[in-house]
Amino acid sequence: MRVRRAGRWRMPGTSPQFRGPPIGVPLQERPALIGPAAGGYRFMRSSNRSSRRELLRAAGLAAGLTAAAEARILGAADPPRDPDTVLAGLLEGNKRFMSGQTSLLTRRRPQDFAGLAEGQAPSAVIVACADSRVAPELIFDQGVGDLFVVRVAGNVVTGAGAVVKGSIEYAVAELGCRLILVVGHSQCGAVKAAMAHIDSNDALPGSIGGLVEVIKPAVTAAAGQPGDRLDNTIRANVRKCVETINGLAPILSKAVDSGTLKVVGAVYDLKSGRVDVFS
Ligand SMILES: [Zn+2]
């Protein structure tokens, strides 16, 4: 089974040796998210799509792939890319999760994982808290390969540095994701810590102080708002993350401006299981 091993993209007008990381990527065509017209990255392709598809179909059938996994790899029935459609699908999955009607074995069997070993085509990027109670594949009732998940305490992006931002950019530029969903959650411990230490100069151990520091602007932004202070701060933190992602140049900001990428904020309620999209 042939795969494109490295992202062969480059900035227009720059040397072709400026290459992406050596990570397996799906063999399907990618939407022209950030093409030359947008002044962004350009994908370089050389293989024949139809013959590649035939090869993969034969290999997939021989390996006993599920229809969904096969379709995902083949690109024959590409997973939805339109951000509104993807978001609607995630919210439908959340309804299944809330009602207990989860499709627990949907694309979660060993053969489903094996079928995706050569490439991935996730439909959305989920930026969520590392909290053990916030598991994106579960709360959206999704299977292996459906979500590109970036999890860090407090679901921070603003001030989080290149590791978090670069991970998100990679999912958009190289994997073709057109929806980024930032998911805060009720009773977030990282946000609580930022609130507790907003007025104090006490030192937190290790790097925890640095983490809390980047959430403090959300505490300030939510100050004085009517309603629950913690809930307001959690939402303010999500809004700041969404704003930061929207403005990440050159990759994400151009994709947002061209309408190919949508960044949405949401909050997950630990008790009800409901994901509430609010920005
Ligand atoms: Zn949290």
Image: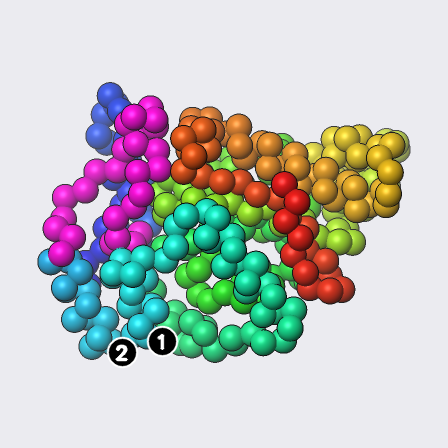
Q: Is residue 152 visible?
A: no
Q: Is residue 75 visible?
A: yes
Q: Quadrant of the C terminus?
A: top right
- The numbered mark at residue 64 is 2
Q: Amino acid at mark 1?
A: Gln
Q: Residues within 10 Å of mark 2 (few under 14, many from 20)?
A: some
Q: What's drawn in magenta, residue-wise?
A: 25-50
**Is residue 31 rendered magenta in the image?**
yes
Element at badge 1?
helix
Examine the rendered structure and indicate whether residue 201 appears above or below residue 132: above
Cα separation, mark 1 vs mark 2, equals 8 Å
Where's residue 244, x and y in %? 58, 32
Q: Amino acid at mark 2?
A: Gly
Residue at image point 32% right, 75% down: 66
Task: Tell me if 148 is positioned left or right of 194 in this view.
Answer: left
Task: Tell me if 261 is positioned left or right of 46 in this view.
Answer: right
Comes first in the chain, label 1 or label 2:
2
Q: Which quadrant holds residue 272? A: bottom right
The reply to whether discs 1 and 2 touch (Cβ–Cβ < 8 Å) is yes
> Which residue has dot 1 on it?
111
Residue at image point 42% right, 76% down: 109
Element at badge 2?
loop
Where's residue 95, x and y in %? 61, 66
